[in-house]
């Protein structure tokens, strides 16, 4: 199956762009959902967990769906399903209905995430060069575009339902533009993949590394503002830490294919892990909140291409079919995002938030050390 046509690569990028837009468009709606349903902060946290549960339940079976029905069907059906569910996030009138809507939204997003990464692994492998960082870079661009566009529409006075429908139409159009050149069939060797198998061998190792990186990324998302406001910034300025992280990560990913092609996967893991660890050290030791901002940028720069390299490794390993391997590492990695806020909260309560961030730096050092493990054979 030849997939090196430029149109295949563009379609894959469009799928990542659409997924990033869909996922991030929910963030500006959270305060509205809280006010509409009348829930307290703790109850809102439980509701938000429903999104993650939906994703976690859908991810493990997406690999076999893509293997049997092709990435195109799974990407389009899950993506358009996500578009169908999204407007209901703006109108769900009660906590139980919002929980159900978030669960369905999470399930469609999780399926889309795994299916597009399976497509990316196949296209990159057939192309014979580094493409994964660029694909993930488009997801980051979509995240900025989705959250920014939704915020802008609401700020300009558009009502929440109209803004949600408008964003839904945009995401659907991007998906439909991607559709014609998405892969209709999986590689022949994977079409008879078992429905569900436990991850094994290198896949477990890759999944754990993804979980560490996702845990670090999630900690920056959920706790950077707290750390900065504790250091003296105002509440309005607290988001600058994540902004510095996100911009650096996006720039790193958009340039990542050239970096991986030139340096190779093992060196990207080594230098990326070291850079992220150094960034966490800067954040912890910074004498003022403002001086911590370069540290957050360094974390984003270092981490930007680690996960793409690990997804490439999942496609190259021989312990499991690539489609099932991508499902497995996505599930394990996403568990890090879900568990991250709670784990960091417990650690912050026990030893302080700065020590919790220092522990994340140690975790990134372990990622750097993995470049000298047997994983090196799959990322070269």
Image (spheres, grey):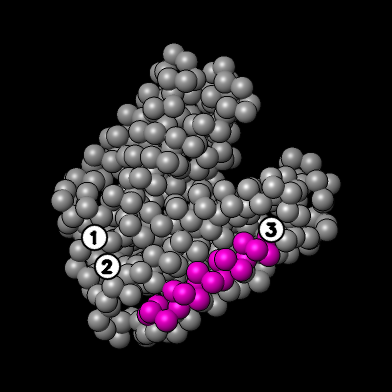
- Of helix, strand and loop, which one carries label 1? loop
Q: Which residue is mark 2?
A: 124
**Mark 3 or 2, nearer chain start:** 2
Q: Which residue is mark 1?
A: 130
Above or below, comparing residue 227 to residue 10 in the picture: above
Do residues under tags 1 and 2 come within 8 Å of each other at their CB atoms? yes
Q: Closer to us: mark 1 or mark 3?
A: 3
Above or below, comparing residue 137 to residue 43 in the picture: below
**Mark 1 or 3, nearer chain start:** 1
Q: Position of residue 239 (x, y in %)?
A: 56, 33
- Of helix, strand and loop, which one carries label 2? helix
Do residues under tags 3 and 2 come within 8 Å of each other at their CB atoms? no
Q: Which residue is mark 3?
A: 163
Magenta stretch, residue numbers: 163-183
One can see residue 231 in this view: yes
The residue under the point 74% across, 49% down is 157
Q: Could you give the CA–CA distance between mark 1 and mark 2, rounded to whole angstroms?
A: 7 Å
The residue carrying pointer 2 sits among few (fewer than 14), some (14 to 19) or many (20 or more) residues within 10 Å by Cα, namely many
User: Residue 189 appears in which quarter of the rendering?
Assistant: bottom left
Q: Position of residue 165 (x, y in %)?
A: 68, 65
Q: Is residue 315 left or right of residue 66?
A: left
Q: Is residue 296 left or right of residue 314?
A: right
Q: Could you give the CA–CA distance between mark 1 and mark 3, rounded to whole angstroms?
A: 37 Å
The residue under the point 42% across, 32% down is 296
Q: Position of residue 152 (x, y in %)?
A: 63, 48
The residue carrying pointer 3 sits among few (fewer than 14), some (14 to 19) or many (20 or more) residues within 10 Å by Cα, namely many
Above or below, comparing residue 329 to residue 4 in the picture: above
Magenta span contains residue 218: no
């Amino acid at each position: 199956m030849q997939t090196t046509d430029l149109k295949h690569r563009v379609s894959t990028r469009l799928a990542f762009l659409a997924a990033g837009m869909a996922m991030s468009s929910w963030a500006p709606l959270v305060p509205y959902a809280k006010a509409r349903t009348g829930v307290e902060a703790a109850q809102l946290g439980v509701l938000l967990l429903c999104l993650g549960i939906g994703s976690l339940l859908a991810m493990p079976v997406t690999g076999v769906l893509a293997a049997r029905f092709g990435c195109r069907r799974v990407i389009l059906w899950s993506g358009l399903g996500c578009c169908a569910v999204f407007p209901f996030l703006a109108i769900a009138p009660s906590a139980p209905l919002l929980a159900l809507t978030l669960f369905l939204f999470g399930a469609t997003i999780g399926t889309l995430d795994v299916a597009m990464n399976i497509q990316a692994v196949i296209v990159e492998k057939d192309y014979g060069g580094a493409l994964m960082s660029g694909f993930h870079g488009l997801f980051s661009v979509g995240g900025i575009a989705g959250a920014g566009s939704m915020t802008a529409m609401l700020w300009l006075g558009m009502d929440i339902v109209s803004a949600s429908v408008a964003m839904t139409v945009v995401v659907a159009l991007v998906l439909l533009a991607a559709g014609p050149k998405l892969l209709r069939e999986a590689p022949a060797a994977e079409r008879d993949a078992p429905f569900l198998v436990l991850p094994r061998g290198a896949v477990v190792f890759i999944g754990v590394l993804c979980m560490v990186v996702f845990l670090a990324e999630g900690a920056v998302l959920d706790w950077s503002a707290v750390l900065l406001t504790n250091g003296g910034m105002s509440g309005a300025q607290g988001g600058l830490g994540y902004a510095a992280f996100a911009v650096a990560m996006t720039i790193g990913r958009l340039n990542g294919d050239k970096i991986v092609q030139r340096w190779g996967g093992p060196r990207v893991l080594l230098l990326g892990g070291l850079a992220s660890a150094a960034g966490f050290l800067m954040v912890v030791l910074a004498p003022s909140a403002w001086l911590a901002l370069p540290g957050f940028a360094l974390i984003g720069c270092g981490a930007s291409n680690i996960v793409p390299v690990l997804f490439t490794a999942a496609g190259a390993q021989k312990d499991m079919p690539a489609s099932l391997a991508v499902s497995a590492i996505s599930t394990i990695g996403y568990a890090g995002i879900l568990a991250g806020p709670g784990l960091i909260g417990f650690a912050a309560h026990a030893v302080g938030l700065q020590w919790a961030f220092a522990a994340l730096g140690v975790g990134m050092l372990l990622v750097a050390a993995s470049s000298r493990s047997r994983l090196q054979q799959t990322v070269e």
